[in-house]
Amino acid sequence: MASGSLDLLTRFETILAVKRCLDSSNRGVVFNLLEGCDRGGSFNRWYPSQIKRACESFGGVEIFSGYLDGDFTVRITL
């Protein structure tokens, strides 16, 4: 589980980190991201559909949103 830590990575680094976590897991991973258009700068932002598409080949992807404005959670199960 990762909370907030992936927001500081580039998009490439985010996918790489998720893949590495999955490689070390036998069940899956859960992480949250900031929602919105990637504007460069300090924080990495994604739209849920973008991260879902980027991670579909890793396993089952579920998105949870609506609990906090500008934030969403991703669960990938193996």
Image (cartoon, rainbow, N blue to C red):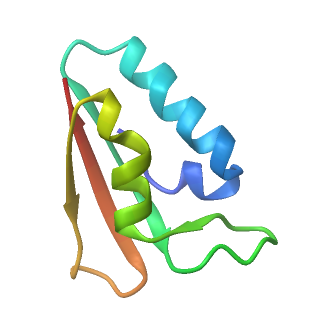
- Which residue sits at x=78%, y=68%? 42
Q: Position of residue 19 (x, y in %)?
A: 47, 26
Please, which residue is most extreme toward the bottom here?
A: 69
Q: Quadrant of the C terminus?
A: top left
Query: What percent of the width, then of the height, locates residue 39?
Result: 73, 78
Residue occupying image coordinates x 39% and y 74%: 71
Q: Quadrant of the N terminus?
A: top left
13 to 37, vertically: above or below: above
Q: Residue at x 31, y 82 (%)?
A: 68
Q: Quadrant of residue 61?
A: top left
User: Residue 65's image quarter?
Assistant: bottom left
How many numbered marks have been drawn onto this rendered protein structure? 0
Say above or below: 3 vs 78. Answer: below
Would residue 2 be seen by someone viewing this image from the given angle? no
Instruction: Between residue 59 and residue 34, name the one nearer to us.
Output: 59
Residue lying furthest right: 41
Q: Which picture quadrant has residue 25?
A: top left
Classify residue 43 as left or right of residue 15.
Answer: right
Measuring 47% from the left and 33% from the top, which residue is drawn there? 18
Identify whether 36 is placed above or below 47: below
Q: Position of residue 57 (x, y in %)?
A: 33, 31
Whether residue 45 can be seen here: yes
